[in-house]
Image (cartoon, helix red, strand yellow):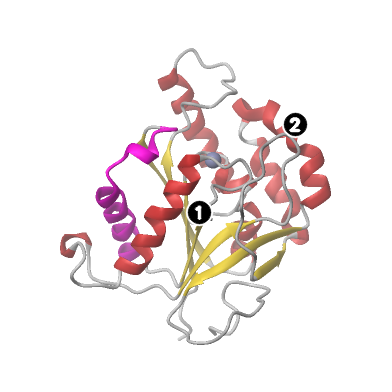
Amino acid sequence: MAVTRKLLCIVAHPDDECYAFGGALALAHAEGVETCVVCLTDGQAATHRGASTSGADLGAIRRKEFADSCKVLGVTYHELLDYQDAQLEFADFSLAASRIVARIRAFQPQVVLTFGSDGAANSHPDHTMVSAFTTAAFHWAGNPKRYPGAGPVFKPTRLFHQTTDFFLPDRPNPSPIPWTVTLDIRSVFEKKIEAFRQHVSQAPLMERTKPIFEAHGSHERYTLMATPELGEARQLTHFFEGLE
Ligand SMILES: [Zn+2]
């Protein structure tokens, strides 16, 4: 029997799953890959606050928007944790990593996706932190000495960081890692935009970034960061290439 292909994606905020990883997730769904998205915060510190009356209210609204977006992208499982938006750099590192280790061991993905250490196009410190937590968790999930209480060990095969081939015009440029994966997302581009539209509270952001999506929306870029496969870096067109 063929092994079920699984992809785990760890993000920081509701809307990361669509604007950054939406093409990857929708393509995975179209190709029969099981997907799981774990989001660490409910986005209470957002600049755009929609019709919310308080931080908690915005958090509740964005939890629902995240769920709706995951549904559009065909995400198999989604989960939103209880970390404070814009505070991840102060979170307990080991505890955060252990929570991601527990998700890796429970879901058993071959492929793990997260942000690059640059913090993505907007250099958000939460993105840098989710990258660090997930990178540690990727390496620790297969080690029986790490978090023995977090489930039976499981070693995922490939860790990819999200990266970019363009900069935002109104932000300081980050220092992104050169890519090794060019994912053609044209077949699911409309799904990605539709997922973004579920984030009604963030509609002004979508309006502002529309020209960027139109100019650069045909591909998403990622970098293979870790794998037990030995060899020099090579360019891939999808995450599972050569694993079948
Ligand atoms: Zn974000």
* Of 22 and 229, the residue lying toward us: 229
Residue type pointed to by label 2 = Arg
Residue 56 screen position, x and y as percent:
40, 21
Residue 174 screen position, x and y as percent:
62, 47
Residue type pointed to by label 1 = Ser
Q: Which of the image's four quarters has the N terminus? A: bottom left
Q: Which of the image's four quarters has the C terminus? A: bottom right
Residue lying at the far top of the rendered structure? 53
Q: Residue at x 25, y 52 (%)?
A: 94
Evaluate whether residue 38 shows in this view.
no
Residue stretch in magenta: 85-106
Evaluate whether residue 158 shows in this view.
yes
Given contact means CB atoms under 8 Å apart, are the residues at marks 1 and 2 in contact? no
On screen, residue 107 versus residue 124, left or right, reads left
Q: Residue at x 43, y 32 (%)?
A: 85
Q: Give the label on residue 208, or none.
A: 2
Does residue 150 belong to the magenta stretch?
Answer: no
Q: Which residue is mark 1?
A: 117
Residue 244's place in the image compared with 106, above or below, is below
Q: Nearer the viewer, mark 1 or mark 2?
A: 1
First-in-chain label (1 vs 2): 1
Q: Main secondary structure of the magenta part?
A: helix
On screen, residue 207 versus residue 17, left or right, reads right
Q: CA distance from mark 1 to mark 2?
A: 25 Å
